[in-house]
Amino acid sequence: MKNQIVTVLGSTGTIGSELVDLLSISSVTFRAVLRNVSRIRKIPGVVWIQTDVSDTSTLKATLAGTDSLFLLTGNQPGFGKIQIEIIKIADSLGVKHAVKLSALGASPRTKSGLTLEHWEAEQVLESTKMTWTILRPHAFMQNWLGEEAKTVREENAIYSAVGDGIVPFIDARDISAVAVETLLNPELHHGQRYILTGGEAFGFKRLANTLSQVTGRTIVYKPLSMDEMRIRIEKQGIPSESIDSLLALAAYQKAGGATEKVSESVQEILKRPPRSVEDFAKDYQEYFL
């Protein structure tokens, strides 16, 4: 799609900020939507738009003229309804293509409220006149930069309820790169639901060993029961519904099966291997030191 206008919702988070950087060097005209103007960066080619996407009265003006839309919002309970409204308005305005960031396991049978809301938004998107691409990434490596990095720095330890479960964690930068490809080349990716994973599945013992090498300290993995993990997460002030979703995901990962499977989509779309846990640890080592 030549001379298109791309609009990015969720432009300042882990995926969105990298996506904005990649679009900036692609010479495409694009808008980056954000709520907090203090997070605006000086980047060539971007037009920043300040709005709250949960306020539907602003969405028509925000999305007007858009050809390709990247749909990413916060994942607080109820986000699915916000995304559904965005999708409906985009469709009414004649947006041609939408790339939705979803989640692995999105289905009507999931026990995770988060993934159920993603599935419900997917169904609405697939019923529109727009062409669409759905990205269902596995767990992000960048999620370790929060609580895991803190406990590594303070306790030389990593805690999780997944036991010996192994997961093909993905570097969020690879998700952003795939998103750019699907936004700029919709004719190659419309109607596709891509599972996005790293190149191999591994557990938290492997992460602890890798971080030990990077930090020069002995980092240990301490598996917890679901109840013990709930108590730890509650102390972080996370809402109970979000905790339920996180623990449901941990239970899936602990059980293995589908959550262990490695997808070739990143390799096929980007024509290179996904970043490894060693790549990630080297690039983000300052968070763990």
Image (cartoon, rainbow, N blue to C red):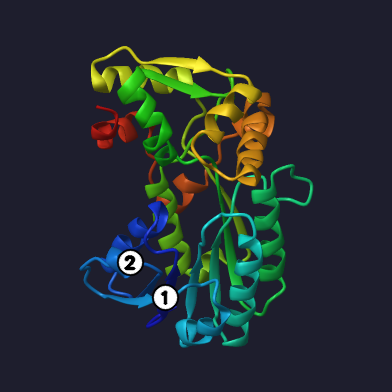
Viewer-proximal residue, 93 or 243?
Answer: 243
Residue beneath the point at 38% across and 33% down: 276
Quarter assignment of residue 156: top left
3 to 213, vertically: above or below: below
Quarter assignment of residue 5: bottom left
**Which quarter of the figure is the N terminus placed in?**
bottom left
Q: SS for tag 1?
A: strand
Residue beneath the point at 56% across and 41% down: 263
What kind of residue is marked 1? Val
- Is 155 on the left or on the right of 54, as rendered? left
Question: Residue 248, percent across and down?
Answer: 67, 36
- Is 222 on the left or on the right of 224, as rendered? left
What kind of residue is marked 2? Leu
Q: Which mark is residue 23?
A: 2
Viewer-proximal residue, 74 or 116?
Answer: 74
The residue where tag 1 is placed is 6
Question: Residue 138, percent across and down?
Answer: 54, 42
Q: Residues within 10 Å of mark 2 (few under 14, many from 20)?
A: many
Question: Residue 230, percent across and down?
Answer: 60, 30
Asked whether residue 203 is in view, the answer is no
158 to 138, vertically: above or below: above
**Which quarter of the figure is the C terminus placed in?**
top left
Viewer-proximal residue, 224 or 119?
Answer: 224
Quarter assignment of residue 259: top right
Marks 2 and 1: CB-CB under 8 Å? yes
